[in-house]
Amino acid sequence: MDFHPTDEQLQVEEMVRNLARKEFAPRAAQIDEESRYPAENHRMLAELGLLGMLYPAAYGGSEAGPVAYAIALREVASGCASTGVGMAVTNMTGEAIFRYGSEEQRKRYLPMLSGGKGAGAFALTEPGAGSDAGGLSTFARQDGDGFLLDGSKVFITNGEHACVTIVMALTQKSPRKISAFLVEPGTPGFSIGKRERKMGLKGSDTVSLSFEECRVPKSAMLGAPGEGLKIALSALDGGRIGIASQAIGIARSALSAATEYARDRRQFGQAIGEFQAIQWKLADAATELDAAQLLAFRAACMKEKGLPYSKEASMAKLFATEAGNRACHAAVQVLGGYGYIREYPVERHLRDIRVTTIYEGTSEIQRLVISRALCR
Amino acid sequence: MTFDLTEEQRMIQDTAREFARKEIMPKAAELDENSRFPAELIGRMAELGFMGIAVPEVYGGAGMDNVCYAIAMEEISRACASTGVIMSVNNSLACDPILKFGSEEVKREYLVPLASGKKLGCFGLTEPGAGSDAGSQKTTAVRDGDFYVVNGTKNFITNAPHADTCVLFTMTDKAKAHKGITAFVVDMKWKGITVGKHEKKMGIKASPTASIVFEDVRVPAKNRLGNDGDGFKVAMNTLDGGRIGIASQALGIARASLEDALAYAKDRKQFGQAICEFQAIQWMLADMATEIDAARLLIWRAAWMKDRKMRHSKESAMAKLYASEAAMRAAVKGVQIHGGYGYIKEYPAERHFRDAKITEIYEGTSEIQRLIIAAALLKG
């Protein structure tokens, strides 16, 4: 047992923390206000090797590993949650291509992703297939030496800025077989819908995608035919450590803003931090966020060692996102009226963190994964 | 970073789990029912080295680390929370302060029999008027040559009726408030010490709890832990470790609630299927399991920090706060999953519920833990 991060992990933490403080945090309010995609942040992430943390240098990655990745993502999200989710999905896309892709696919896409030529996107969700991801209806019909994709995807993070999108589609209707495809922007028949207007994470681009007789070559298939759902679920296991880390980063920012405010703000003749009503909120938030961090690190360590970690990733995501939401709520309450106005960052933290219990598997799906593992 | 157990940690986990399953679990309901002190189990735990796990072998202990201690506490408490607290008090509240603050002579005389389990220890801090406000001690110790003369009353003292040795806190200089507190190691057979009646409690019934009255008890000055006025420091330092023990006890109770509820939910059929097929039940199980894992990680972190002599007050408080409250939540859910069967003594769920409650109260209430955590945060 060793709770210390390695020297390399500590270096990543320090480097990314500095970047987030200097570059991301100061711009986060403006990015949110303007719902602007932070392309400059994405470039900075690329320069520091933070967009390909889960594959080797031979493909342009930095192969820092799941623990360092969890640390980096937390720090980025604590500066700007929108930048964090863009980073998370880009890393997840790259990792899936590294794990399941052909040599040719790896060589083409991985350096693009890690180099920040574009983001990565992961298109699983459809209007009729949310939690029930296996019920998707986008169809890929074999046609000569390629496939014709038809259907639509919604709520796709990074969709507009992606240099490659992993698209899950049915390749056989009975019995149902889902396969994964790598689709590049500009492919005829592939179009990007309007940007969703969201409660939070406003700098993150969320779009629908539509495929109308969109032709992709046979070589665009990722993994083997029928392997799509397996690829999706394995990517999501890793993705959940990422979203847990994002939630921890956002909530830590909210907690530190609330703690600072509680020290300075005076009412009834003393700092409000002297009141137990306020102390309780801070103590509970800090305790739960430490527990969340340990759950996320445990899952990341298991992944790093090549052990099965689905249940642990679900526990980390469930716990971190729910605890993070509670912490952000508490932070708004500690700041009172100031917590509700945009001059202070905590209202943004509360809006940003809300989605973390929803995307990459709702809390309800995490509980299903956990209880199935228990009842097995 | 790694969450893997060492060879030694895995070994004690296996040993404690096996011992708890075979020898403690079958007796737990009877111990509770009869409020009976499990003397025979304490003897067996002494043989296994569980009464002084983190005490070096030269002082009669098992010479293992605090993570081992937390692991063993979880396993013992999984089977019987009462047996768990008897063990925790001896390890954390009797052995640990003597090891850290006692003179070599005191260690030889008192620590060796305690750590080897030949004798049992208790911890006399709480008084009728000094609960969370432990600094407001009324028990006095007045210097008289090579002795101190002690007068006062302690209450809610775990292990008191069976204890041979007490780590006792007294006021030696009232003007200095909590800086006037001094700690001693006291032999419970000394003249002037009487143990009051056993408290009748909601849970942990096999762990005896009683008051102790001190009337003109002459304590040799050499039995002092640290110097005059060090007592509050001794108490707080000791409780930092004690909280790891109680957090582990709570974790064991939480696991008992989950494991029993899970077995029941797989077995019990309603509406034509096992009730674990219903999301209402799955949700409770998933939340219990997640919180249990979170609690264990907080506990292991605190124990690991204690092993490295790092400051761990805040982390112990977090572990104790979280684990005890998670145990209570798990116990409530455990009863609920059992329905009517959760309310009757044929099933252990109601005992877990009664046992869990104390973990939010003793060795610092949840409220005291939050004070410690908030103070650390606000100090920044």
Image (cartoon, coloured by chain):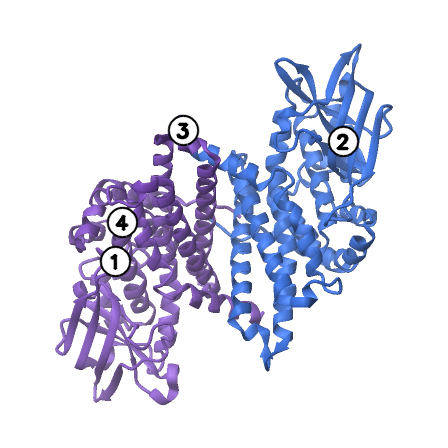
Chain colours: A blue, B purple
**Depth check, front residue: A67 or B215:** B215
Question: Residue A165 shows which numbered tag?
Answer: 2
| Number of numbered markers | 4
- The residue sitting at 25% across, 87% down in the picture is B142
- Give the alpha-carbon distance from disc 1 to disc 3, as whole Å: 44 Å
Left or right of residue A8: residue B375: left
**Chain ID for label 4?**
B
Task: Please name the amino acid that badge 1 sits on.
Answer: Ile
* Label 3 SS: loop
Residue under label 4, please give it.
B80
Q: Are marks 1 and 3 on the same chain?
A: yes
Q: Is residue A196 above or below residue B53?
A: above
Q: From the image, state whether disc 1 or disc 4 is nearer to you.
A: 4
Left or right of residue B203: residue A77: right
**Depth check, front residue: A64 or B19:** B19
**Does the rendering let one see residue A165?**
yes
Residue under label 1, please give it.
B86
Residue under label 3, please give it.
B271
Query: Mark 1 near mark 4, Cβ–Cβ under 8 Å?
Result: no
Percent across and percent down for residue A200 are 72, 50
Residue B267: quarter of image: top left
